[in-house]
Image (cartoon, rainbow, N blue to C red):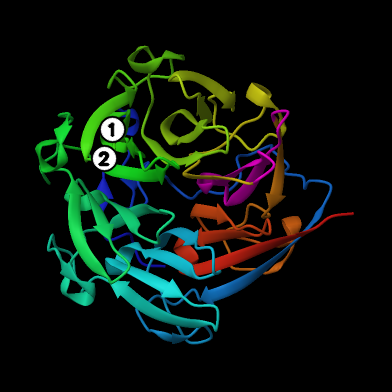
Amino acid sequence: MRSHPLFRWTAEFAAAATLTFALAACGGGNSATGVSSGSTPTTSATVEQVSTVAGSTQWGATNGPVASAKFNDPCDVAVDAAGNIYVDDTGNHLIRKIDTNGNVTTVAGAGTGGNVDGNGVAAKFDFPNGFTLDSSGNLYVADSGNNTIRKIDTSGNVTTFAGSSASGSANGRGTAASFNFPAGIVIDPSGNLFVADDGNNLIRKIDPSGNVTTFAGSGAQGSANGLGTAASFNAPHGIVLDASGNLYVADGGNNVIRKIDPSGNVTTLAGSGAQGAANGKGTAASFNKPDGVAVDASGNVYVADTGNNLIRKIDSMGNVTTLAGSGAQALTNGQGTAAAFYSPEGLTVDAAGNVYVADTLNNAIRKIVATHS
């Protein structure tokens, strides 16, 4: 396996002089080292069948039928109401689409890193990260390497919605604001965007007019719960919104999943803070550099537990189980823990409850279908 195209030092490991490998769009400084020693993942009560939708362990940028299409370190995935799958093809600096007929095309991006607005393949991204779809079909992209939020409208026109491209944490309107490695992004029904501003350890909010404010986080690296800027994060990455307006954040550097209610109060939903793969309730469970989060209609939260090569599930009571993955670094289809992933980064849930996973270092998009007993 090739090395990542971008290297990033993170403060938590720099002190120990440890270089962490991280794609700009995958953020979080995650290493894919497998399940921590002494932990044994278990599956939930249902049977989860894992299959490969598109891609293979061989990286590339080939469009066409899913059987021959290739990706390069895809870091996020989204599904629209019609069932089309969008892929944040990070290593290729592209936004790709898998239609319902199984054909892969390029939505936007020239395939080389850059910061250029324009239509479709005339535009350029720099290690684009997470993205989110609004109700009209517009895509908003956390363009991590450019420190900006980009918008792709339904005609494929790419514009810069917020961020100056310079690294910073300034609030303000549109390009007067600044970000530092924005990672995850989600939109609410009113059109407000919430951004996991990874390098600033902040959760930012962008209203429909483009005004950027800080919603939660002090900016200091930490794990404090509290209201708004009294709370602290450590390289927050994935972010998702439930039907009640609660935000869930994969706080990768803290190895926890945080919850932010509509008033801005931050709590720890699950994870002890120590690296591990223990199942259990709330803070009795453990994760290893979780990068992605998704939520279903029942309020279950799904976690791409990147460092453990697992997909985890947190039910509405806070119980953490292992949905799929053996912990081995491999591309293996099968049921539950018979399947294997390699550094899964992003995930989403469709209306039918199917989970789609950006299996980053396998260069593949995976699908988990749950069969309930």
Q: Which residue is mark 1?
A: 14
Characterize the local packing of mark 1: few (<14), some (14-19) or many (20 or more) Cα atoms within 10 angstroms.
few
Q: Position of residue 60 (x, y in %)?
A: 36, 78
Q: Which residues are magenta?
A: 297-318
Percent coordinates x, y for residue 119 in the rendering: 19, 72
Identify the image quadrant of the N terminus: bottom left
Residue located at (50% from left, 71% from top): 84
Horizontal relation, residue 293 to residue 281: left or right: left
In this rendering, the answer to whether 234 lies above or below 70 is above
Q: Secondary structure at mark 2?
A: loop
**Closer to the N terminus: mark 2 or mark 1?**
2
40 lies left or right of 100 = right
Q: Tag 1's secondary structure?
A: helix
Using the rendered view, name the quadrant where residue 305 is placed. top right
Residue 302 is marked as none
Residue 137 seen? yes
Q: Residue at x 54, y 26 (%)?
A: 274
Is 306 included in the stretch rendered in magenta?
yes
129 lies above or below 281: below
Mark drawn on residue 9: 2
